[in-house]
Amino acid sequence: MASLSLGLNLSRKKGAARTGAVERKNLVTVCRFSVKTLIDRSCFETIDDSSPEFINFVSILEQILSHRLKGQITWFGYESPRSFWDFIRVACSKVPHSCISSIENMENVRTSRAKGRAWIRVALMEKRLSEYISAALRDFKTTRRFYEDGAIVLGEEAGLLADMLIGLNAIDFSFCLKGEGLDGSCPAVIDYTPYLKFTQSSDSISSDEEEMRTLGSSGSESSTPENIGPALFMDQSSWFNKCKRVEQKYRMVLEQKGYLEELVRLREAQLAESVSQNKVLLQRLSETDLSHKLEKEQLEYIVLELQDQLKSFHSLDQLSADINLSQTSLDPAQSQELEGKAERPRWHSEGKEDTPSLRGLCGSLTSVASYKSLASLKSSECLASPTTEMTSPGLTPS
């Protein structure tokens, strides 16, 4: 059982490796064909954004530069899709006189996909697309950081890609970068029909109609048992011609099968990408709803606490006012006594300054001489009262 599972894993790995190799080879081959068609078309007309050859070439180049491109890890730990412009912006930043900064400062170009498409057009108009690609591929450390194993830019096909793009320097491109076509969110789709041309060989004996007629007649003859014998003795040339026609049909069907398989693979990749993006968006939506609910609960709790504190403040103010009113209404004598006590320290403090002069006066009064003079004044009969001195107008000071 273990050997069977191991064999299945090995067969799956081999199948995946073969699929990746075929995919890389097909993309590089189709890119070479698109470059040739662009060069041939430029001999007869000007190449612009509306040319189907140019649209197909840009789609192929975007597919090559986005082949096995690593996603960007977000803060939540999820992997979001990334555009090839992120790689070009870092890898080509050291190219002298590059157009990276000018593309970054474009006002009408905001998304990474639009900036990458604008870079392709500017590089073609500057005739430096091969130079940019070669400089980016030489920065192997950055390339390893942005691409997974098995990518085209990490394989041997990368050198062929840079060489085949040199032929585009012979074309004078002219593009308008102010339109809204660069901001398209739809992925680049490659049209393989211009490269699937099947021509009938010159040594073919009969046309398609004659072939269908002969096949029908041979089928009707072979249905009768008496004609089996003559059919076996047909000459060698007729058998050779039939085998050649069948082989040609087989090749046509095989090529068409490969084309349809490639289309199915592209549609499956687009569907898987859409499903992954949908899952990421749903996860973000659920996380955002949860965070909003938590914030709402916290705000409600804070509002309740503030209301409780406000009520407690009002109750304390009312209680202090009631206490003051009750004290003043129930004990007015005590309040007057408190006011008197409050005024007494002030009187004592003011009287402290007169204490030294009063002591001198008291000392002079308690001395013997002053006491005798006071006794003599008391015994004298002609001592006038102060009221008489103040009220008698006839007395004058000596």
Image (cartoon, grey):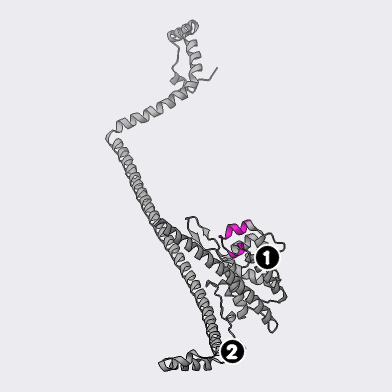
Q: Which residues are magenta?
A: 141-155
Q: Position of residue 148 (x, y in %)?
A: 55, 60
Task: Check the image and report above or below for 138 versus 129.
Answer: above
Instruction: Report the side of 46 relative to 394 (left or right).
Output: right
Query: Crowding near pointer 2: few (<14 within 10 Å), some, many (20+)?
Result: few
Q: Is residue 207 above or below residue 177?
A: below
How far across and how far down the image is residue 4, in percent?
42, 59
Residue 180 makes an appearance in the image: no
Mark 2: secondary structure: loop
Residue type, label 1: Tyr
Q: Residues within 10 Å of mark 1 (few under 14, many from 20)?
A: some
The quadrant where residue 342 appears: top left
| In front of the other: 384 or 293 | 293
Q: Main secondary structure of the magenta part?
A: helix
Q: Secondary structure at mark 1?
A: helix
Q: Nearer the viewer, residue 324 or 22?
A: 22
N-terminal label among 1 and 2 = 1
The residue beneath circle 1 is 132
- Mark 2 = which residue? 204
Placement of the C terminus among the 4 image quadrants: top right
User: Of the residues shown, which amino acid type is indicated by label 2?
Assistant: Ser
Residue at left offset 43%, top offset 10%: 378
Question: Can residue 54 be spotted in the picture?
Answer: yes
